[in-house]
Amino acid sequence: MATFLYNLGRLAFRRRHFVALIWVALLTLAGVGAASAPAAGTTSFSIPGTEAQKAFDLLEQRFPGASADGATGRIVFKAPDGQKMTDADNKATVAKTVKELGGGTEVVSVTDPFTTNAVSKDGSVAYTSVKYEVPGMELADSTRESLEAAGDDARAAGLTVDVGGDALEAGAEPGAAGEIVGIAIAAVVLVITLGSIVAAGLPLLTAIIGVGIGVSTITVLAKALDLGDTTSTLALMIGLAVGIDYALFIVSRYRNELAEGRDREEAAGRATGTAGSAVVFAGLTVVIALAGLAVVNVPMLTKMGLAAAGTVVIAVLIALTMIPAMLGYAGSKIRPAGEKRKSSKEHTSSDAATSQKQAKPNMGTRWASFVIRRPVAVLVLGVVGLGAIALPATQLELGLPDDGSQPTSTTQRRAYDTLSEGFGPGFNGPLMIVVDAKDSDDPTAAFGDVADGIKDLKDVVTVTPPAPNKAGDTATITVIPNSKPSSTQTEDLVHAIRDKGSDFKAETDAEVLVTGTTAMNIDFSQKLNDALVPYLALVVGLAFLLLIVVFRSILVPLKAALGFLLSVLAALGAVVAVFQWGWFSGLIGVEETGPIMSMMPIFMVGVVFGLAMDYEVFLVTRMREAYVHGETPSQAVVTGFRHSARVVVAAAIIMMAVFGGFISSGESMIKMIGFGLAIAVFFDAFVVRMAIVPAVLALLGKKAWWLPKWLDRALPNVDVEGEGLRAHDERTKDSGSGSDEDRELVRV
């Protein structure tokens, strides 16, 4: 592996014009394709194998043309103080609004609140529901704009009007200002770490090119593959972070190789062969974690994971080829590590440079030495600290965000609050009961029995009369709970109706299915919970095997996996504390606390595991390299920190800045993901990898690198440590030729 990548790096350095042209051509091709690509169509949300999805499919079959999965909008009217919605003028205003909505495109039906009993008991609030032909994400912009503007005349007449429902769903937009701040912080960190603006610019440039290619490709494929905007947001978030980090590791290693006295082409080759090997395996762990989301069997998650994994693959390829090419263009503008300003003198010899570094330990050396002297104290403090932060995760409540989690400044949130005030919180999350009486002797009686049975259940406010289809074999019943959609009481009601469904089946031969947005969210959360353990076993198991190959050790990969679990649990605990309990929520603009997004645990396991293994590979491979080359276990830990700690810290800060930029998003889901990933990177990089890892390795000593002989013989030798390059050096010394010619060819 190291030798192949070494040759690849040298080739890219020499043929830099060709390499740069290829990547610029790919970016141009992807950009042109994205600009001319058709607009994305439906981004339907389906959960195969759940009762809610089965009910939706049955509705499509038994109620053709009813658009069971079509978007729904709600116009909520509130009368001024001292008036009622039933007053003649207000009724006329509402009637005019209903008429205008009914003439819109993509509209299936519009309800009249005065004929559907959609007026509150005190007469102050009324609402009309609009049903559309297509899901919310597929609605034309003009249709969505018409819905938002429908209440303008009513507002002019003195009514308070707000609009809610999934018809207003547009793509999840990340905070643009936050992204710019994140990239700016990354640029500052890169300048400090790499010592020059040119060196800092390379990771940013190549990361942006990689993300540009990845996101443009997603845009090109969006319509054909039914990809939503959240897919490209995740690809942007992950691709930008790993793209910068992977390039940073190679450029940093390049500067170290220059400091050893090597010429620029040789340094580029060695940086690609050593740090590039770590990049390949770190990228593989991220790809495994993201692609593994397919085991959940939720199409949306599968597409998000595969798209982000593809962007990571592009980031790895760019780091291995375009970075060496850009190093060739940069020439002497990138200085050796430790050289503060340009000098007219030639670089010192390898031995002198090495002795100077050893005489003046850096911060990484001093920290590693401290941990090695007090490994037990550091280990206990790190584990107990993260364990305490993880405690709130034991109170984790899962759900999906609804209009009640929107900022109070939005019309969706105001509509949600007004409906709750006028009709009760359950009106924001009605349950749809589908009664399949095709096998029943008396379908009409079965429909009535089901409706009467549900009325007797706890937490039920309203049960509408059954609405059968034309064939008379299937009916829908709407149930209004007494609690808000995201509450545990509503979840209990869904389970109670489903439990009672077995009684209905035995008595009437009719099958009862519960669906609707609320039931779909409950089923989605349950499906993710059920898939978490198999997913964790698959991802951690595959990565564990991969790390055994990389480190040729059993205990080091085991320690890496356990450290990851600790950091991800602590991150989940922090997410619960902020977004569910409301601790420090004002600092990041969380206006409404509530259940944690149901995909958050499995999503964080996937993404954080991949990123955590990045730091593990980059840090520990340098330790492994030193150990293989003859240093004692303790010396190897210090050496690994001397060369890698500064860069790993910089990489972690960059990732935190990039992820933190998404906290400014107005979309609660994106805000939660940004915060969760940023805090997880902090815990994993600064506590687990920087403190717990060296403490454990210091306690294990040589046992850390133990591997059964039979397994050692069976495993392939991927040579991450660069032993092949050492053999190459020996052959070059013996031949005494070749290097001078190369140096003259590339000297800048």
Image (cartoon, helix red, strand yellow):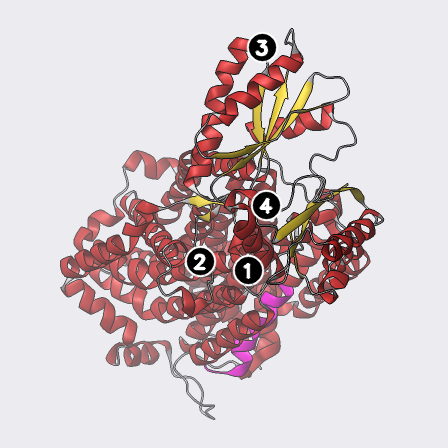
Give x and y (percent) for residue 481.
51, 37
In the image, farthest residue toward the bottom: 344
Give x and y (percent) for residue 295.
51, 35
Seen at 54% across and 58% down, the residue is 406
Q: Residues within 10 Å of mark 4 (few under 14, many from 20)?
A: many
State the residue position of label 3: 509
Q: Nearer the viewer, mark 2 or mark 4?
A: 2
The answer to which of marks 1 and 4 sits earlier in the sequence is 1
The disc label shown at residue 237, or none: 1
For the residues labelled 3 and 4, the Cα–Cα distance comes to 43 Å
Q: Are marks 2 and 4 in contact (CB under 8 Å)?
A: no
Give x and y (percent) for residue 744.
57, 78
Q: Secondary structure at mark 4?
A: helix
Residue 88 lies left or right of residue 526; in this view the side is right
The residue segment tinted magenta is 195-210
State the residue position of label 4: 306
For the residues labelled 1 and 4, the Cα–Cα distance comes to 14 Å
